[in-house]
Image: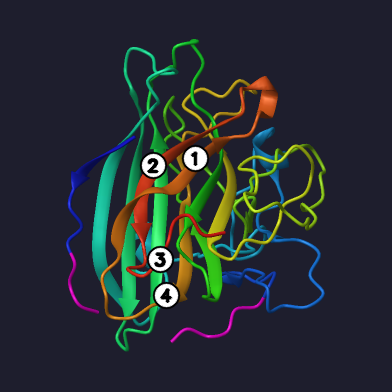
Amino acid sequence: MYKKLCISIFLQFLISVPVVGAQGFVELPDSAIKGIDSAYVSCNTTGEYGLSSSALPSEEANNTCAVISEDLMKSPLNSPVDGFKLVGVQVGDIEMSAEMSGKDSVVARLSEAIWRNQEKTECVLATQIEMHDAPMMNGEYFEINDIAHAGFANKKVAVAYFHKPHSTEPGGKTEVLFRAGRTFTSVPTEKQKTLPSLVNDPAQPPAIATSNKAGLHSNWVDFTTDISFKDKDGVTRSISSIFYIRYACDARDPISAPGAIRLRSTGQSGSKSFELPVSGLIPADANVMLF
């Protein structure tokens, strides 16, 4: 469930071809690429997917997929790509499902922003989540290992993230992006695990895999991170980096669609595996239920 706090405000607004493994935007696999063996690409490979402390991206190291920008340090509303202007912003509460909710049902805040280039041919969608001090009914805190976002079928997609350090006090600290995939399926993480291999899915692919395999689903982008207000593994990061998706678009404004974003706890450190669908921004012509 997702309570919108502010309506998107839409104003009017050249991206080079991305290189896999490079700093900044990295193109995700799609069905047109031959010889790939995973729907995912690696980004920040430190931190064992959140089981230990990750290393921050810098100009010198750990910067695959990372946007390093003084302008973004000043304001997250600045574009991560030159030549793009802000189109709209949407912020809302994330509410836990009734059967799992504790005293406070609002477990996090979701912020989204859209930028578009002057030619109205390309857009960048940003997503960030900040966890709240709101334990669930069982006393545990919601842990998000993966954020899956719909709406990108038949489009080339590139991803990036911006990491801004926050307070070291409880409720602070920002986690990096460990990997990103062109897939609906989130895969549980383990120490030293290789990227998930491709698999031929049934018509309805699983939200959370039971093995280290995930199909290639062009409509979806999955970001693997590890955020919780109080993590059971003792390495707490309660704020996600800003995750960016760059894709072909037109002059039409995006829309908010139910279930466009899937927040997944994949069972890390013995937590229960489950998915929480929430509303999110998608291109005007997108279909959430495509794979």
Percent of width and height locating residue 45? 71, 51
Color theme of the render:
rainbow
Gap in angstroms between the C-alphas marked 2 and 3: 16 Å
Q: CA distance from mark 4 to mark 3?
A: 23 Å
Question: Quick check: marks 1 and 3 in contact, CB under 8 Å?
Answer: no
For mark 1, give the secondary structure.
Answer: strand
Q: Earlier in the sequence, mark 2 or mark 3?
A: 2
Badge nearest the viewer, 1 or 3? 3
Q: Position of residue 194 (x, y in %)?
A: 82, 50
Determine which residue is flagged by label 4. Answer: 81
Q: Quadrant of the N terminus?
A: top left
Ranked by sequence position, the earlier of labels 1 and 3 is 1
Q: Which residue is mark 3?
A: 286
Per the rendering, the mark at residue 263 is 1
Residue linked to disc 2: 278
Which residue type does callout 1 highlight? Answer: Leu
Dot in front, 4 or 3 = 3
Is there CB contact under 8 Å for labels 2 and 1? yes
The magenta segment is 10-19
